[in-house]
Amino acid sequence: MKRVTGRAGTVALITAAALIAGNLPAAAESPFANLAGTWSGQGKVRLEGGKSEAIRCKAYYTTSDGGSGLGMAIRCASAANKIEMRANLSYANGSVSGSWEERTYNAAGQVTGQASSSKLTLKIQGGGLDGNMSVRLGGASQSVSISTTGSTFQGLDLSLSRG
């Protein structure tokens, strides 16, 4: 597997985090319904050697196909990076799947996993990134945790809220 380093690695990790942060289902019938609109938040990227870097993100979500589809546009910035990402996701029978792309750095990948009303557990692959993600919903906020392998970027912790 390709080892992700430098700016491209940070972009892939932040993109994946922002992508997943929007995926927590509101209900089994329409998992993305409560996500429509604008979300924003901040967190930290965990790097090799115990270092970390602060990030801020803003996400715009739109639902389709009766709530089983989700389109998103996400912008994140840290001290060293700025990204713009687009994604299309689908939900069916408890499973989430989809694709993402980060246009500035030409990175792309796939997302697969399981969803419930309060938690999302996903596998993220592509753009030189291989990792796992957990998303928990708490009212009008979301908590995101990512762990990665094969990268100088060890993970990310992010909190998003509506507005």
Image (spheres, rainbow, N blue to C red):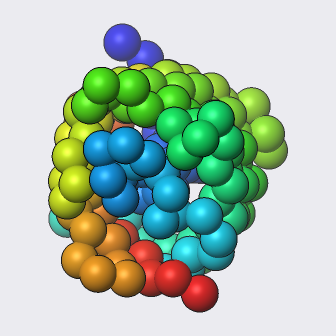
Q: Is residue 24 left or right of residue 55?
A: left
In percent of width and height, residue 8 lies at 59, 41
**Residue at x-position 57% and y-position 27%:** 99
The picture quadrant where one finds residue 135 is: bottom left
Image location of residue 34, percent across then percent down? 47, 65
119 and 86: which is toward the camera: 119
Q: How many marks?
A: 0
Residue ID at (35%, 79%): 141
Name the spot of residue 89 as percent of width and height, x first: 55, 34
Answer with left or right where residue 31 lies relative to residue 109: left
Where on the picture, by quarter, is residue 59?
Answer: bottom right
**Residue 127 higher or lower than 105, as above or below:** above
Judging depth in this view, the residue of 157 and 93 nearest the camera is 93
Can the viewer see residue 88? yes
Describe residue 83's horizontal placement relative to residue 157 as left or right.
right
Relative to residue 105, is residue 34 depicted above or below? Answer: below
Residue at point 43%, 47% (across, down): 30
In front: 151, or 93? 93
Looking at the image, which residue sits at the far top? 1
In-image side of 159 versus 65 (left or right): left
Which x, y percent locates residue 105? 73, 39
- The C terminus lies in quadrant: bottom right
Nearer to us in this view, 142 or 127: 142
The answer to whether 143 is drawn above or below residue 66 in the figure is below
Q: Residue furthest bottom?
A: 163
| Residue positioned 43% across, 17% down in the render | 2
Residue 145 visible in the current orientation: no
Taking the view exactly as shown, the residue that stands out farthest to the right is 104
